[in-house]
Image (cartoon, rainbow, N blue to C red):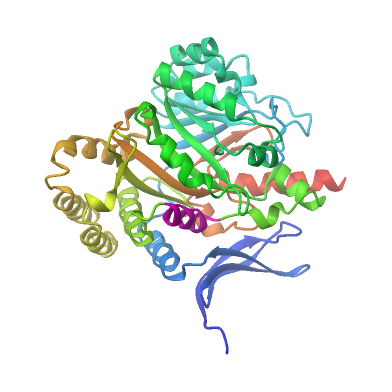
Amino acid sequence: MQTATSFLRQTRGRCHTCLEEVPASVIRRGGEVHLEKQCPDHGRSAQLLSRSPERWIDLDRYYFEVNEPSYPQRDYIVRMTERCNLDCPICLASANTEDTPDLDLSGLETLLSERRGIKIDLMAAEPTLREDLEDWIRKVKASGNIAALHSNGLKLAKFEYAKKLKEAGLDEVFLQFDGFDEEAHKVLRGRPLVKARMKTLENLRELGIATSLIVVIARGLNEAEVSKTFRFALQPENTHIREVFFLGLRMLGSARANDERGEGSLRDMAMMPDELLDRLCEQEPSILPDDVRRFNKLYFALLSVFRVKKCLYVQHYLVTRDGEGGYAPAASWMNLEAIEVAADRYAVDHKRSPRLARARLLSAVARNCLNRSTFGMLMDLFRMQHLLHDGMNLARVPPRFLLLGFITACDPHNFDAQVAVNCGKGELSVDGGFTESSAIANVQREARFERSREE
């Protein structure tokens, strides 16, 4: 029996072996969707995108109908240092492997003088190793922008240090938090970390710092941690946790180097957003894949309304807390079927009359969110909508909500040039300078790592 094949779109990708840019196609083969590439030197390579082709194809089509590369960038990664106080086997940055100087932040000074209302992601290997971190948090805040810290949390486990960052104006912390399985931590991070991270979360709670948990999930290793971490974030004492991002393991930096040396089967553990969503839906039956698909069509439409860049590989869902450790999924208080109809209409209308399309969409969202269960949270829903325009500052996300994300980083396997040009993050780094797409910076950096390893 022959497998049904359908061509979805043509793009550009990267060869898995030499990392050169090559022709690529997004193709459905039976019950799967793949990104297939053809390198003149190394032949065909492919990346599985989804085992739920109807869901993937619908969102892929819709995303490109409503989002445009011309939207301005509003979120910038600043790779402050390539040093780290951990040596994670999966480190995307290949921390501590090269003698790279810390970033001269004159470029950030220029960016802050030119932009307001954007998010500055102070990150890279481990930004808390920078002695001037507090000063830069102050500068980001003084310039009218959002100060976000991405950290492994080890230094934040010291209360006085975390307090100093709070007093400097820190808005939010994106904390590496890969669940509660210490054996998985040893594989992913090289050592047990749960105790230290729980202390960090205690400090962030006491200081009232809005927190996003970044949970790396690897196939066959810690998939059971998806629901466990979600349920932990819902606990009544954890309302400072405003977001949980499930991040699929990708083949960048140390992960790619270790896989090439044969130190495990990391490549087999890499996951895409659809697989992460499937794990949550399997473990939390009240969250349905089709509801998440409909919600993301609304999300992509609102990104278009407010002209916000965001990657196709970043998808979301929303739940409300019940105050006792439970939750209500968005589908229980939003008419997502009607909202999907409105979102589909928006995709048609916005090409002809953006203002009319916007008015119709926002009106439909209001109608289909207004009921007895939502009447008391109308102002919070209004705030959430405008956070897309004003910058998604987690400190301003109403505590009743918990955002869920299903995401992946762009590596040479899943890199899709049409997706990458819409990357929701720009980047400033020592090796790459200033770029409007962190996805492009990722694969360019990986090619440089590859050349260094061959020398």
Q: Position of residue 262 (x, y in %)?
A: 81, 52
Give me the residue at 79% from left, 52% from top: 260
Q: Nearer the viewer, residue 107 or 91?
A: 91
Question: Is residue 117 rendered to the left or right of residue 427?
Answer: left
Give me the residue at 70% from left, 61% from top: 15
Q: Is residue 278 magenta?
A: yes
| Residue 142 visible | no
Which picture quadrant has residue 289?
bottom left
> Residue furthest toward the front?
324
Q: Is residue 224 above or below residue 22?
A: above
- Quadrant in which the N terminus appears: bottom right
- Quadrant in which the C terminus appears: top right
Q: Is residue 425 above or below residue 140?
A: below
- Magenta-tinted stretch: 272-283
Question: Is residue 258 rendered to the left or right of residue 233?
Answer: right
Question: Is residue 33 rendered to the left or right of residue 282?
Answer: right
Q: Nearer the viewer, residue 405 or 133?
A: 405
Q: Is residue 183 above or below residue 32?
A: above
Q: Nearer the viewer, residue 82 or 244?
A: 244
Q: Is residue 206 above or below residue 398?
A: above
Which picture quadrant has residue 287?
bottom left
Q: Is residue 223 magenta?
A: no
Q: Position of residue 403 (x, y in %)?
A: 37, 41
> Residue furthest toward the right?
455
Q: Position of residue 257 (x, y in %)?
A: 77, 47
